[in-house]
Amino acid sequence: MCNNIYTPYLMQIEDIIEETSDARTFRLKFKNPDDAEKFSFKAGQFGEYSVFGEGESTFCIASSPTRKEYIECTFRKAGRVTNALANLEIGDTVGFRGPYGNTFPIEEWEGKNLLYIAGGIALPPMRCVIWNTIDLREKYKDITIVYGARSVADLVYKHELKVWEEMPDIKLITTVDPGGQTPDWKGEIGFVPMVLEKAAPSSENTIAILCGPPVMIKFTMPVLKKLGFQDKDIFTTLENRMKCGFGKCGRCNVGKVFVCKDGPVFTNEQLLTMPQEY
Amino acid sequence: MNSIVSRAKELLENKSVQVIVGFEAGPTGKARPAFVTYPSKTDILIFDERCVQNLAVYLTKKEVKQFGKIGIVATLPIMRSIMMLISEQQVFAENIEILGVSTEGKYLDIADIQVMQGYIEKCDLSNPSNDQETLAMLNKMSMQEKFDYWQNELSTCIKCYACRQACPMCYCTRCAVECNQPQWIPVQANTHGNMEWHILRAMHLAGRCISCGECGRACPVNIPCHLLTMQLADQAHKYFNVYAGTSEKMSSVLSTYEPNDKESFIL
Amino acid sequence: METTHKIIRKHSLEKLYVTLLENRKIYAPVKQADNLIGYQYNPAFSEVTFDHLQSTLSVKNVVFPKVENLFYYTNNKTDSTVKGIDLEKFPEVVLWGAHPCDTAAYDVLRSIFCWDIKDEFFAARLEKLVVIGLACHKSDALCFCTSVGLSPDSSKGSDILLVPLNNGDYKAEIITEKGSRIVAESPEIFENYGDETVNVTVVEQKFDHKQLTSKLSNAFEHPFWLANSLRCIGCGACAYVCPTCACFDIQDETRGKNGKRYRSWDSCGFGLFTLHTSGHNPREVQSQRWRQRILHKFSYMPERNESLGCVGCGRCSRACPVDMNIAEQLQALQSI
């Protein structure tokens, strides 16, 4: 077999978790043990997941690199490929190419506080780095996670939110948009930027990692600035449309920056130098 | 073409329109679309035999619509396109001013859509004569010969979609070829997929094509794809006795059903 | 290697052509029935044109076909399989009579496909390609090779460059090892070059590309883009005829359980090119897409890939249904 850079690894769906009405998580195992042996990645990297006959879709690897036996991805049913993925069952084959892109510089963050802020389906790209840093807990100071969704039903990783909540050395703040709460909802009610402003975490020796829909980013950024965060200490991931994943197909570029090669992880300092084309 | 220039200047000066869509001469001698927003710049407007593009394509373009009310230099095919766009509610008559040009290239004073309709009704609306000749030749061919002719022509298609983009009637923001659930037409430019694309395009224009020939002119590899839609324009006239773009209240022949419709075309 | 100069007599060209055809495929320009110039595989020598200004399509398809199969798959739910493509089986091809703009374009494509990770399909096809270029004795108002650092007799990208001589013969510049091997196969065809005068056209320089690139680094927000792209109708003609445009799409096509994944030409001018599934589109309107086209070639590529993304062939301007004349725009951009 003559494999090339476009040929995916064959993966088997080992487990499926229905996260919300339209989002699910796959746990994927390499079919070929040699591939599993050779494969390694770092937090923040992404891959191209394929259903043969439908095409490929880009998402971050949502599991932590510290857990080597599998990779996980979480996606929302939206387009052609994700709809096809949504119809697969345990045991089915999925193609995977990767890992691609840069990584969260977690070594540089050692000795600092970490503030994770995510909205809706944007927790998955952050879950990898969250678990990665939790697994290396002693290297970091305070870890705070602020996570919001439209409604309780739209929160992904509900089982893990419980785990994080129970961890004594993790501060978790969950919130849902007004009207999205259930009678037994114990978390906050309000949009992520407001909840963040109220919680007012210190920017002292802290890295903020921010992922969410454009509107959330737009209103959260000023709050972070108000809290005293510097642009170089705010990290986010860009999600431009991609085909190849390695800087050839010409689709994801923002100015001369390739999101697939130079990203997906960027600091706000970097984003400010780039044209507004993402 | 003094009248076009003076009318354009007048419309811009009294702010009846915010932009004039017309023709200018490019540096290599080709005529090309021009967008004039200042009265002082109207002198660049020209009209001569090089000005054949169907400017109505710009009436649905977001960046052009943003100017506000549009004044448009309109020959017969452009007028018919405007009529079609009005009947399909893509353009509103009150948002455009017509700077008419007759088939002889003379300035026409078109006060409103009713005047335009009157003018269109007086014109010969059949396909251009040279295209009619080619169509007559093709119609004499056997089914197999016709198939071979088109297969050969369409094999060179590179799917750049210039035919679609140049057509004022192809205004969909998401074309059927771009709908991928399911994928109706193969994305790749192979002979089979190319044929499917051109058949789909022709069928979507059946009874809507106003025979301007712009699709064929736009094609960078000279595929006479305008013959496909012109053939259907002919058929629409033959079976339904209508020419597209003759009334602002026209309903589409293929999506309107009437008890007295002839059904002879159904196998 | 050092370039050597030889002469091929007009009457010897056919011999060279036939010799090459014995064990290779030849891709050469012919005049088609519709009077356009197009390249074909293995045309009879009598059909090959030496007199054309330019082919309608570029010759990038030799190394970047409009459809390239990437692998085959069988979709069997729990045990789907994939089967790769044997790159060794790509044929050896001689590209015959391509003009210097087209041959130089291979260097540009290489800077796109082979920066960082190497694209094996492109690299394997280029490896199997021998380029016999043909200097231009004709040009028109839309040619601008001299503005992008090339010339009508530039040998960039050629293994052998044929330069027309006033007497009807050709000077053969032997540029690479691949070229020398061709000479070694039929040494009798290549005679010694004296000082015969060449018949090469003159292309007027329209702008200074270095100055342009530095100008463009701050031009992203300039009103130029909207004002000069209103007439662009957003088709892909410019990108598809362009010898250096390399953007592609990846798609699957299945019959029953079996299918293939392929890549095919795409264009940044299309509205759906950057559309996210969410509905958000970073380049929503045509002026943004036109800006991307120009900036990619004249700003991003020089800064990122150390290669200008344009060879000045002027094809885009010839193919454009609405006379988007790129050289005219670049000239104007130089002085914004």
Image (cartoon, coloured by chain):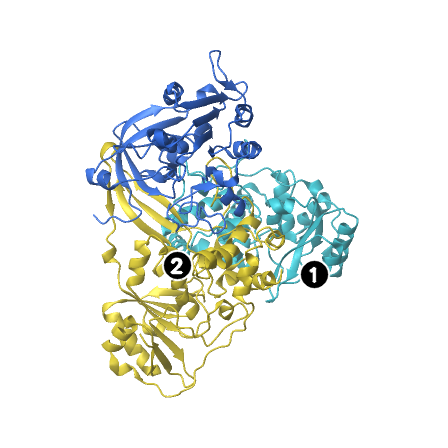
Chain colours: A blue, B cyan, C yellow
Between residue B223 and residue C291, name the one nearer to us: C291
Asked whether B15 or B46 is in front, the reply is: B15
Q: Which mark is residue C67?
A: none
Q: Nearer the viewer, mark 1 or mark 2?
A: 2
**Pick the front one: C240 or A121:** A121
Task: Name above or below for residue C300 compared with residue A178.
Answer: below
Return the residue found at the far top.
Answer: A183
Q: Residues within 10 Å of mark 1 (few under 14, many from 20)?
A: some
Q: Is residue A90 above or below residue B218?
A: above
- Who's the residue at 28% across and 63% down the image? C128
User: Residue flagged by tag 1: what amino acid is it?
Assistant: Ile
Please name the residue that numbered disc 1 is placed on.
B44
x and y, in percent, of residue B25 in the image? 64, 63
Q: Position of residue A255 (x, y in %)?
A: 50, 50
- The quadrant holding residue A259 is top left
Q: Position of residue A142 (x, y in %)?
A: 43, 27
Q: Determine contact: label 1, label 2, CB under 8 Å.
A: no
Q: Which residue occupies 42% across, 73% down? A: C154
How many angstroms separate mark 1 from mark 2 (CA)?
42 Å
Observer able to see residue C189: yes
Residue type at mark 2 is: Ser
x 50%, y 21%: residue:
A176
- Under circle 2, the secondary element is helix
Q: Of helix, strand and loop, which one carries label 1?
A: helix
Which disc number belongs to residue C111? Answer: 2
